[in-house]
C-alpha cells in the first residue's frame, strides 16, 4: 500500500519490506532497490525481505564496464554520474504521482541495451518519467551484470548466462512486489532495445521466466549475431579464465579488452562477444530454440521491429572506409548500411514475427524512421530511445538527434510512446498517426 502522501514521502509496504521512495515532479521514484545477491561468476539468489525501512532514493549503480567515449558523443550524457559496482543487481520504479492501489496500472519492465557490455538501468538518457506520465504505466528499470561479469561463460569452467539469470530474478521480484507500487502483476510487459531486446526474446523461452510476463516489445534485436556462438565462446574463455573471483575489477576489465581482441577473427559475431549461450541454464539448446519460440507464441503478445537504418551508427557499420571516397563513398556507404541493417536486424525480425504468428501468437512488426535528413545518423540504431525516453538535459548534446529540435523529439515521440503504452495496457497494436512509424499487424488470437 502507499502511504505518507500528506508529507510527500511515498511509503510502500510489500513482501520485500517497507520501502520509502521520493517525489520527482509528476512522478514518484523508488530507486536502487536490491532484487538479488550474487557472488562474482555465480548465479544470483533472491534478496531476502528488508527488516528495517529502506530509503530507496539512490540511483542503482552500473555494472563495472569499459569506457567507450564515442557513446557520449552519440548519446549525450552516457551513464552520467552513476557509480559503478559489482553490487549492481538493483532496480528502480517510476510511478505516476497520482496513482492509487485501487487502480492497478500496466507494468513495463525495461532492460537496457549496450552490446551486453555497457549501460545501466538508471542511465539519464533512459529516464522513463515522460512515458510514465503520458501513458499511466509503472516502469521498472533493471540493472544487471554485463560483459565478463554476466555474459561470458561456457557452462563448464564458468556458468553461462548469469546476466540473463539476473533478469529472471528481477522479474520474480516484480511479480512478488509490484502490486504494492500500484502495478498490476497480471499485466507485465518486458521491453528492451538492442542487447536488451535480445535478452527479452530469450527470456520468452526461459522456463524460469515462464508466467512472469505476458507481453514483449523487442526493439532492434541483433538476432543476426546470436547463432553458432559456442566455438567462439570456447576460444574467448582462454582469456576469460585469466581472472577469477579474487581478481580486481581493473584486472577483470583488462581481460574484457583482451576478450574483445580475441573475438575479432570471428567476423560479425565477434562484434558481440558477450551474449546469451544456448544449451545452458536457462536456455534450450540451439537446435531447440525455434521450436521453443513457437511453443510460447500463444502465451505472449509481441511487438517487434527495427529502425530504418540500423547500421548508420559507426559501431554498427564495418565499412566506414567507404566514406573516404568523395563521390562513390556516400553511395557505397548507403548500400552497406542497407545490407548490414537487413542482414543483422530486419530479416531476422521478420522471421521472428512469422514464426510467432504461425505458432498461434499475436504479433505486430514495425519500422521506425526518424531524424533530420542532414544527420548521418537519422533512423540509426537507438534512435527510438530519445523518442521513448525524452529527457532534454540528457539528450540535448547527443549527435543522434542533431538537426531536430526538442519540440520535434517530444511531438514525434509522443506517438511512439502512445503505441508502446497501448500495447502494454491491453495488447492492442495501435494504429500510428505519424509517418515515422510503420506497423504491420498479423493475424492471431484475440487480445485477452
Image (spheres, helix red, strand yellow):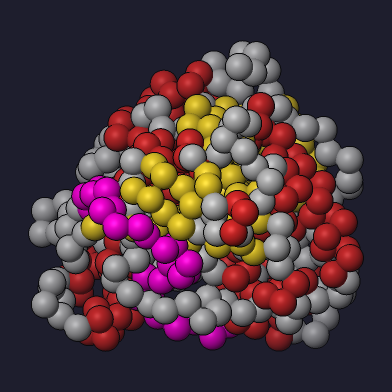
The reply, left or right, for residue 160 in relation to residue 105 is left
Q: Please state the extent of the stretch shown in magenta in the rendering.
A: 44-71
Q: Compare residues 399 and 53 and report the one nearer the observer.
A: 53
Residue 312 placement: quadrant:
bottom right
Q: Compare residues 390 and 99 and report the one nearer the observer.
A: 99
Please determine whether, in this image, residue 261 is positioned above or below residue 170.
below
Residue 248 placement: quadrant:
bottom left
The reply, left or right, for residue 120 in relation to residue 259 is right
Please determine whether, in this image, residue 422 is positioned above or below residue 382.
above
User: Any magenta on residue 58?
Assistant: yes
Please determine whether, in this image, residue 326 is positioned above or below residue 75.
below
The spot of residue 295 in percent (x, y) is 41, 21
The spot of residue 408 in percent (x, y) is 88, 63
The reply, left or right, for residue 23 in relation to residue 170 is right
Tell me the residue at 26%/86% (across/down).
250
* Secondary structure character of the magenta stretch overall: loop
Residue 214 seen: no
Q: Compare residues 115 and 203 and report the one nearer the observer.
A: 203
The spot of residue 356 in percent (x, y) is 54, 26
Tell me the residue at 72%/34% (across/down).
422
Tell me the residue at 43%/24% (across/down).
296
Tell me the residue at 29%/35% (across/down).
208
Q: Compare residues 106 and 343 and report the one nearer the observer.
A: 106
Q: Quadrant of the C terminus?
A: top right
Residue 199 seen: yes
Query: Residue pushed farthest top?
Result: 445
The spot of residue 334 in percent (x, y) is 75, 66
The reply, left or right, for residue 54 in relation to residue 5 is left
User: Any magenta on residue 92?
Assistant: no
Amino acid at each position: 500500500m502507499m502511504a505518507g502522501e500528506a508529507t510527500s514521502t511515498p511509503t510502500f509496504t510489500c513482501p520485500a519490506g517497507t520501502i520509502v521512495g521520493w517525489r520527482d515532479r509528476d512522478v514518484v521514484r523508488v530507486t536502487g532497490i536490491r532484487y538479488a545477491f550474487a557472488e562474482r561468476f555465480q548465479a544470483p539468489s533472491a534478496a531476502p525481505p528488508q527488516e528495517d525501512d529502506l530509503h530507496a532514493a539512490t540511483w542503482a549503480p552500473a555494472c563495472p564496464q569499459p569506457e567507450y567515449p564515442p557513446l557520449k558523443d552519440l548519446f549525450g550524457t552516457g551513464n552520467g554520474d552513476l557509480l559503478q559496482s559489482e553490487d549492481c543487481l538493483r532496480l528502480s520504479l517510476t510511478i505516476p504521482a497520482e496513482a492509487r492501489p485501487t487502480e492497478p496500472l500496466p507494468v513495463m519492465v525495461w532492460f537496457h541495451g549496450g552490446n551486453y557490455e555497457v549501460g545501466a538501468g538508471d542511465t539519464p538518457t533512459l529516464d522513463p518519467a515522460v512515458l510514465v506520465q503520458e501513458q499511466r504505466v509503472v516502469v521498472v528499470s533493471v540493472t544487471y551484470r554485463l560483459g565478463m561479469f554476466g555474459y561470458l561463460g561456457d557452462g563448464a569452467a564458468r556458468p553461462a548466462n548469469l546476466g540473463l539469470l539476473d533478469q529472471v530474478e528481477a522479474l520474480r521480484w516484480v511479480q512478488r512486489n509490484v502490486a504494492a507500487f500500484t502495478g498490476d502483476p497480471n499485466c507485465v510487459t518486458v521491453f528492451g532495445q538492442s542487447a536488451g531486446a535480445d535478452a527479452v526474446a530469450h527470456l520468452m523461452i526461459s522456463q524460469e521466466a515462464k508466467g512472469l510476463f505476458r507481453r514483449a516489445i523487442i526493439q532492434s534485436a541483433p538476432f543476426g549475431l546470436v547463432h553458432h556462438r559456442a566455438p567462439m565462446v570456447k576460444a574467448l574463455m582462454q582469456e576469460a579464465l585469466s581472472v577469477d573471483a579474487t581478481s580486481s575489477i581493473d584486472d577483470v576489465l583488462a581481460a574484457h579488452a583482451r576478450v574483445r581482441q580475441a573475438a575479432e577473427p570471428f567476423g560479425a559475431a565477434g562484434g558481440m562477444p558477450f551474449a546469451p549461450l544456448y544449451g545452458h541454464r536457462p536456455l534450450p539448446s540451439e537446435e531447440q530454440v525455434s521450436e521453443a519460440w513457437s511453443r510460447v507464441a500463444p502465451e505472449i503478445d509481441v511487438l517487434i521491429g527495427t529502425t530504418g537504418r540500423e547500421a548508420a551508427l559507426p559501431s554498427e557499420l564495418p565499412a566506414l572506409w567507404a566514406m573516404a571516397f568523395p563521390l562513390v563513398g556516400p553511395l557505397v556507404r548507403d548500400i552497406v548500411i542497407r545490407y548490414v541493417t537487413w542482414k543483422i536486424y530486419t530479416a531476422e525480425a521478420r522471421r521472428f514475427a512469422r514464426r510467432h504468428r504461425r505458432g498461434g501468437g499475436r504479433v505486430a512488426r514495425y519500422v521506425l524512421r526518424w531524424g533530420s535528413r542532414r544527420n548521418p545518423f537519422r533512423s540509426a540504431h537507438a534512435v527510438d530511445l530519445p523518442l521513448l525516453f525524452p529527457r532534454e538535459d540528457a539528450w540535448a548534446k547527443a549527435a543522434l538527434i542533431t538537426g531536430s529540435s526538442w519540440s520535434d523529439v517530444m511531438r514525434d515521440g509522443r506517438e511512439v510512446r502512445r503505441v508502446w503504452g497501448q500495447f502494454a495496457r491491453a495488447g492492442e497494436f495501435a494504429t500510428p498517426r505519424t509517418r515515422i512509424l510503420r506497423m504491420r499487424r498479423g493475424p492471431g488470437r484475440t487480445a485477452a
